[in-house]
Amino acid sequence: MEDRDHKKLGKRLGLFTFSHDVGKGLPLFTAKGAAMRRAIETFIIDEEIRRGYQHVRTPDIAKLDLYKKSGHYPHYKDSMYAPIKIDDEEFMLRPMTCPHHFELYLSKPHSYRELPMRIAELAGLYRYEQSGELMGLQRVRTFCLADAHIICKDEEQAIEEIGGALDLIEYIAGVFGLEMGKDYWYRLSLGDRNNTEKYYDNPDAWEKSEDLMRELMHKRGSKFVEAGDEAAFYGPKIDVQMKNSNGKEDTAFTVQYDFCMPDRFNLTYISEDGSPKRAFVVHRSSVGAIERIMAFLIEHYAGSFPTWLAPEQVRILSVSETHAAYAKEVHQKLKDAKVRAEIDISNTALGKKIHRASEDLLPYTIVIGDEEMSHSTITVESRDEGALGSMRIEDFVSRIRAEEKH
């Protein structure tokens, strides 16, 4: 699996790098790597909005008191960055998004008619991972999480929303070309009633929530394994597990049931009879950390990305200097059509240009010579299908658009 190692492939394909002066676990994405990120992020945001999520923006920093209130600070302080003192107050780079989203919810009263309320964000998070745990994009100290918190009116609605989150995860996994049971699998992560330091002390809530989630998985017909002492401190969770090229298992996506935070933040709604009722919360990540899923996808495709995901979808190659002007014209038309295109009009022999494009694992290459100039066409070569022959630029753009549809 060494040829699929994302650390080596990412460097060879020019997607990301690390700098000693910037710091360990802090990736720097090139233009190509950033283009791949945008493709994933745009897909996720559009799909979540289509499914009724409200995408928001909240700060990457907050007062330390917020994380003490949520309970994250005592439970996770060893993996959080040290507090920053500003104007006699202490702030922290956020390690998670949920307290921010709860504060958004609390900014005004809500009726039962508004629930479930699905609050989502592509959130920048910061965690102090031990140096020995850092590994490429797989485990970093700053990452972007496709996060969401769903405020529900009762347990039944919460379990229904967990099912909807799993539907979303399975759809996304399918678009990514990942197969259930082969590329990923489910784990029901349970708490420990006796460990009240690590887990919220409410045995009845743990018992009921674990039973409800277990029942949901059986109803869905989903195969899963159970793992004790792997839950979040506020409730059980369903983890989507994957293995990297080194054979190490890791959690990629997760859906979590929360019976703790509604109490800590007094999350309520106005019920049918006009009285305030305690809400229930589902935490979920549809695609996990963007960095981690990029690592998985680099290894899954061994760098031969599908067209919608490829940071460079097509490269235009001129046969000689006399074809450079028309090659530039084609390049601009493709860019205007929002195709991720690059151009090679160097004096290098065409054979070498083709070989270089092939090594970069591009979905398409276009050759521009006398024939193409005289007929205002392009000659297209597909990585997966071979020679496609001559076609109009408009027809090629239509082909790209079709391959980008999910």
Image (tube, rainbow, N blue to C red):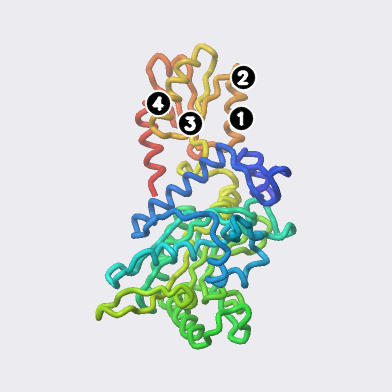
The residues bearing labels 2 and 1 have C-alpha atoms spaced at a distance of 11 Å
Mark in front: 3 vs 1: 3
Q: Is residue 368 above or below residue 261?
A: above
Q: Residue at x 47, y 20 (%)?
A: 327
Residue 324 in the image, given as x and y percentages of width and height:
50, 16
| Residue at screen point 36% across, 55% down | 49
Query: How many marks overall?
Result: 4
Name the residue beneath numbered marker 4: 333
Q: Is residue 365 left or right of residue 84?
A: left
Q: Earlier in the sequence, mark 3 or mark 4?
A: 4
Looking at the rendered image, the disc whose residue lies closer to the viewer, 2 or 4, is 4
Camera-side residue of 78 and 212: 78
Contact between labelled residues 1 and 2, with CB atoms less than 8 Å apart: yes
> Relative to the observer, which residue lies in front, 16 or 305?
16
User: CA gap, disc 1 to disc 4?
Assistant: 23 Å
Q: Which mark is residue 356?
A: 1
Callout 2: SS: loop
Percent position of residue 276, x then y: 33, 78
Task: Check disc 3 and give the amino acid type.
Answer: Ala
Please report the residue visible at 38 percent of the width from the left and 46 percent of the height from the top.
405
Locate residue 291 relative to residue 380 in the image: left or right: right
Would residue 159 be visible to someone looking at this image?
no
Which callout, 1 or 4, points to the residue nearer the camera?
A: 4
Mark 3, other Cα within 10 Å: few <14 / some 14–19 / many ≥20: many
Q: Tell me which amino acid carries mark 4.
A: Lys
